[in-house]
Image (cartoon, rainbow, N blue to C red):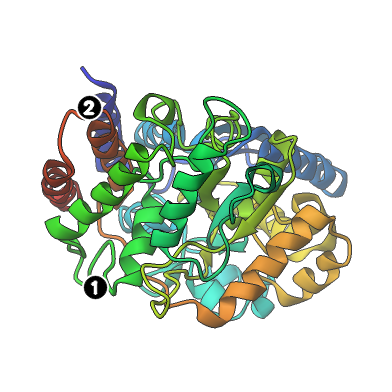
């Protein structure tokens, strides 16, 4: 059985069992004074989260919070397996692509009754609060605001003498500069950019620049074969000009900071989320810079939107829901928790917390706040709610992009395959 098929099997089985994760399904039902928390992310995020857990222990010495984390690709099969086994963690880091499915299958606890009581998020603003709502009910609390972004090795681009990624740059200009970089690269086996053809946020941003989307309002695919073919063709051309890394290098990227070609020293540019800048800089010795995505044309929209970088939810049936709410509030609405997490999970949604934090930030963290402020005037609306099965799309895109990258299929075949497989996974209930 292939890795992809195994992942699909685990996810499908886990999601099918979500409806069973109702009262009594949470791990804390036997002992409310002990909570489990599961999140995805880098070691940087783990260190900050564990520090926050330790700090909260000083506030609530009778509460134990056991944390565990995984990389993005491993996180969702692990969560689905735990939920299916009625061993769901009490505190669940949740993504916008998955919260609709988990909430609608009864795996998450509604949190509306806690607003203004244990959960003091009134100054988040309606948009940031509503980002955690499903069908009108609150199932997740915004852990930070972010957007897609481009990170680049400032020193490497300066050494090459080529213009680096900059705000307002077109994809055509980006490709031309990448090809020039290949001729003047500062070291052997080094490329201008990682290959983002298999990166879901990158594809989505590009689609939005052309007036398209990943999904339609009624839960269908928002792009067609021609769109996907054009996307794969653009990256195939970048590979041909040696502007971006070859397929064998890109295949090592497991959709996390540690394995990205920028971090492994193979590329001078990466496509990521703005909140990941802290983690990337922590693992890169060279000074990094951040800017917005290239655009399909000078007058095209940026494609960016402000989204919850991630949300935090509580398992439906957790006997420790009051304790869980207390810890969530500590993370998002109390200065000590905010200071510990910083902006690694995104810019705080709370205006008062954001204001008190900004003055304490180092230059790396401040650049994230400044980036969000810079792009905000040109951002578009939050995209339609992802349909069931949307969580698998990222894996379908990555696999298809790799097949095109290795030359197993053409960009045209890749475009056709992506549309057909995407239609299949989002129909899976």
Q: Nearer the viewer, residue 194 or 100?
A: 194
Q: In the visual, does 97 lie left or right of 337?
A: left
On screen, residue 37 above or below 343: above
Q: Position of residue 260 (x, y in %)?
A: 52, 35
Does residue 323 appear anywhere in the picture? no
Q: Position of residue 68 (x, y in %)?
A: 60, 31
Q: In the visual, does 361 lie left or right of 178?
A: right
Q: In the visual, does 116 lie left or right of 358?
A: left
On screen, residue 359 above or below 92: below
Residue at 58% x, 39% y is: 41
What residue sits right under mark 2 in the picture?
A: 5
Mark 2 closeness class: few <14, some 14–19, many ≥20 residues within 10 Å: few
In the picture, residue 163 is in which quadrant?
bottom right
Q: In the visual, does 282 lie left or right of 91?
A: right
- Element under disc 1: loop
Q: Nearer the viewer, residue 267 or 393?
A: 267
Q: Which mark is residue 217?
A: 1
Task: Give the quadrant of the N terminus.
Answer: top left
- Element under disc 2: helix
Does residue 378 appear anywhere in the picture? yes
Residue at 42% x, 48% y is: 23
Mark 1 closeness class: few <14, some 14–19, many ≥20 residues within 10 Å: few
Assess whether mark 1 and mark 2 are in contact (beta carbons under 8 angstroms): no
On screen, residue 175 above or below 89: below
Q: Earlier in the sequence, mark 2 or mark 1?
A: 2
In the rendered image, the residue lying farthest to the top is 1
């Amino acid at each position: 059985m292939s890795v992809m098929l195994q992942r699909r099997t685990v996810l499908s089985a886990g999601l099918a069992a979500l409806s069973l994760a109702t009262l009594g399904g949470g791990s804390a039902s036997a002992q409310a004074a002990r909570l489990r928390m599961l999140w995805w992310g880098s070691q940087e995020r783990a260190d900050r989260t564990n520090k926050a857990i330790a700090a909260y222990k000083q506030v609530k010495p009778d509460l134990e919070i056991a944390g565990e984390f995984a990389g993005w690709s491993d996180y969702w099969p692990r969560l689905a397996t735990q939920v299916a086994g009625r061993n769901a963690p009490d505190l669940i880091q949740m993504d916008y692509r998955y919260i609709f499915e988990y909430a609608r299958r009864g795996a998450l606890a509604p949190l509306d009754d806690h607003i203004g009581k244990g959960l003091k998020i009134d100054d988040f603003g309606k948009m940031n609060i509503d980002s955690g709502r499903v069908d009108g009910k609150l199932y997740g609390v915004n852990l930070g605001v972010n957007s897609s972004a481009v990170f680049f090795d400032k020193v490497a681009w300066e050494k090459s003498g080529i213009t680096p990624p900059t705000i307002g740059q077109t994809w055509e200009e980006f490709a031309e500069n990448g090809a020039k970089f290949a001729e003047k690269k500062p070291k052997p086996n080094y490329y201008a950019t990682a290959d983002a053809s298999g990166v879901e946020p990158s594809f989505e941003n590009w689609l939005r620049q052309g007036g398209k989307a990943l999904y339609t309002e009624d839960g269908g695919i928002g792009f067609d074969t021609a769109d996907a073919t054009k996307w794969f063709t653009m990256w195939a051309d970048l590979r041909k000009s040696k502007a971006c890394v070859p397929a064998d290098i890109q295949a090592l990227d497991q959709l996390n900071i540690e394995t990205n070609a920028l971090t492994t020293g193979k590329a001078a540019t990466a496509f990521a989320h703005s909140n990941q800048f802290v983690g990337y800089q922590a693992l890169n010795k060279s000074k990094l810079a951040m800017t917005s995505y290239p655009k399909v044309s000078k007058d095209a929209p940026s494609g960016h939107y402000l989204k919850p970088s991630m949300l935090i939810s509580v398992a439906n049936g957790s006997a420790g829901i009051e304790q869980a709410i207390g810890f969530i509030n500590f993370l998002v609405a109390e200065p000590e928790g905010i200071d510990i997490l910083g902006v690694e999970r995104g810019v705080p949604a709370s205006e008062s917390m954001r204001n008190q934090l900004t003055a304490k930030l180092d230059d790396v963290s401040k650049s994230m706040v400044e980036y969000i402020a810079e792009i905000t005037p040109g951002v578009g609306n939050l995209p339609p709610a992802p349909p069931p099965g949307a969580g698998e799309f990222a894996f379908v895109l990555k696999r298809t992009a790799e097949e095109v990258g290795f030359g197993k299929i053409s960009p045209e075949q890749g475009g056709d395959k992506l549309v057909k497989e995407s239609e299949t996974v989002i129909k899976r209930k």
